[in-house]
Amino acid sequence: MSAPVPYVLEAEDLRRVYRRGPEEIAAVDGVTLRIAKGAFVSIVGPSGSGKTTLINVLGCLDNPTSGRLALEGRTVFEKCRGLSESKLTRVRREVFGYIFQKFYLVPTLTVRENVVLPFTFYEKPGAGADVDRLLAQLGLDKRAEHLPGQLSGGEMQRVAIARALVNRPSILLADEPTGNLDTARSDEIGRILGDLNAREGLTVLLVTHNPKLAALAHRTIELVDGRIRAA
């Protein structure tokens, strides 16, 4: 008998409903998917299709209205009940690294200080040893004492990637990580994400409008009106 596929993320019939007056809007409408360990998955679709809402729900930044969500075999939401906020905070810190379109760097902190910022709240054992390696790996070792305002857009996004990786996440969530970058810098970020997946086996879940970036993934999920059209 073959061993079960080690899914790091499982979603079943997830819905996220918003209310606008008497109107009910299903931004995520019955999504079911499974992400295997080490997968590189892109989520694409037109503006307003629910991509960011979906990744926020999968990444425990927002609660679903109904359905089931499990991470590394642990149920974090089922039917209409989820973990407490304190337990969800721990899940976010232990399981995920987050990258966004905006870099969200603290302007008064150096590159190194921004990267180690997660340690202020939580540090996995041994994670501190990764700081110098990450800075060198991402070409930031000579910029470690610079402030964000002294960096290019591509460099700032690389700092954000290093910060997302410093606590050794199981899943890297990237929501439009090249949305503020030119073509050359976008290609650079794409290569970094591909290398992290291929060389280090990091699970990557990417939301993007960039077809070239999406094509780097092993699997593409198309979302339309909150539903999966193709996967």
Image (cartoon, rainbow, N blue to C red):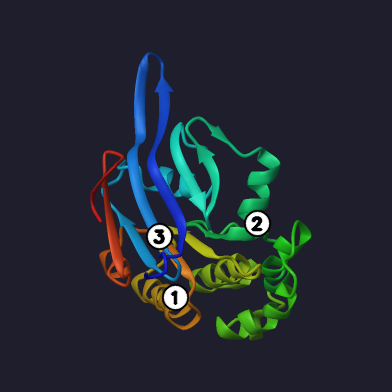
User: In the rendered image of this protein, does residue 78 appear above or below residue 106?
Assistant: above
Amino acid type for the residue under numbered disc 2: Arg
| CB within 8 Å, label 2 to label 1 | no
Q: Residues under labels 2 and 3: Cα distance?
A: 19 Å
Out of 62 and 143, give the one closest to the viewer: 62
Question: Which mark sits nearer the N-terminus, 2 or 1?
Answer: 2
User: In the rendered image of this protein, does residue 138 appear above or below residue 21?
Assistant: below
Q: Position of residue 177 (x, y in %)?
A: 44, 62
Out of 99 and 14, give the one closest to the viewer: 14
Q: Residues under labels 3 and 1: Cα distance?
A: 14 Å
Under circle 1, the secondary element is helix
**Residue 164 lies in quadrant:** bottom right
Picture disc at residue 197: 1
On the image, numbered disc 3 is attached to which residue?
35
Q: Position of residue 56 (x, y in %)?
A: 48, 46
Q: Is residue 33 visible?
A: yes
On the image, numbered disc 2 is attached to which residue?
93
Name the residue at 45% across, 65% down.
6
Amino acid type for the residue under numbered disc 1: Asn
Picture disc at residue 63: none
Under circle 2, the secondary element is helix
Amino acid type for the residue under numbered disc 3: Ile
Quadrant (top left/top right/bottom left/bottom right) for the C terminus: bottom left
Q: Position of residue 85 (x, y in %)?
A: 66, 39
